[in-house]
Image (cartoon, rainbow, N blue to C red):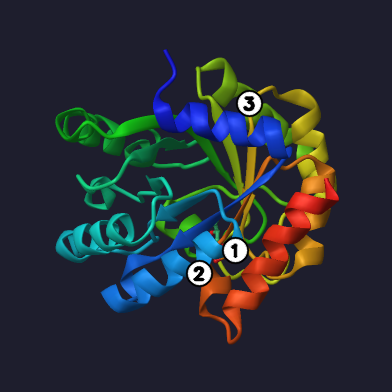
Amino acid sequence: MLGQIEKYLLEKIAAEKAIHMTLIDPEKITLAQAAIIAENSKNSGTTAIMIGGSTFSSQEHLDAVVHTIKETVDLPTILFPNNVSGISKHSDAIWFMSLLNSSDPYFLIGAQIQGAPLIKKFNIEPLPMGYIIVGQGGTAGVVGKAITIPYDKPDLVIAHALAGQYLGMRFIYLEGGSGVVNPVPPEMISAVKKHIDAPLIVGGGIRTREQAVTAVQAGADVIVTGNLIEVADSKRRIAEVVEGIKQKN
Ligand code: 1GP
């Protein structure tokens, strides 16, 4: 049986064709900022708030950030962990993810084995997801010891995505790397989309409405933006991205 958050996401994708999620890196913000970002994201029409970063280590601060977001808005929270320290008991759900192109078994299945009992104990909804780092890959690629797949090799990404789906992962995530100059190209998104049934999440370097719309038109079901919350005028910029996603697909 599908959990509540997964059901909510699938219904939103079915109704709106594509959705936006805001990614908050707890390492970069105070609790006061977390509340403001959550409020602004909600007003912009984002569907859920993801919380996680590539280098985060203070569990106490993570807990406080998730708690603050939950107290501020009624949007679902989804943890986006880079290892077991990315789990917070306050979150509704967690991307239960395997970095499919990691060269390190820890990121393929090791961290998942360590984290699973905690997720059960805290009653956090696991969303099974295959995570693939492509292009430059950014910090996530380095930390996850990924063998990143170049943007001009879509066949390799298709093979990874299919493998994830056949293993039972119900979402596939193409990660270009936070803050990268060039987001995942539409050619790669459409190639993967043609071959899989699972909803396709795309993130990394998306800063403009145009980039978001291009990714959605290529077949992305979920657009994730992280760094955008840090730019000047972020409220307006995120609203533009979300509005573009809602209108243009
Ligand atoms: C999530 O890493 C991305 O997939 C977020 O990237 O920070 O560049 O939006 P940005």
Say whether residue 149 is visible: yes
Say whether residue 30 is visible: no
The quadrant where residue 103 appears: top left
**Label 1 beta carbon less than 8 Å to ligand 1:** no
Residue at left 68%, top 30%?
A: 14
Residue 198, labelled with which disc? 3
Residue at left 44%, top 18%?
A: 2
Image quarter for ligand 1 equals bottom right
Q: Quickly name the residue at label 2.
A: 40
| C-alpha separation, residue under disc 3 versus residue under disc 2 | 29 Å
The answer to whether residue 111 is above or below residue 34 is above
Q: Residues within 10 Å of mark 1 (few under 14, many from 20)?
A: some
Q: Quickly name the residue at label 1.
A: 44
Specify the quadrant that holds the N terminus: top left
Q: Nearer the viewer, mark 3 or mark 1?
A: 1
In the image: residue 141, left or right of residue 161: left
Q: Nearer the viewer, mark 3 or mark 2?
A: 2
- Secondary structure at numbered mark 1: helix
Residue at left 84%, top 46%?
A: 217
The quadrant where residue 135 appears: bottom right
Q: Amino acid at mark 3?
A: Ala
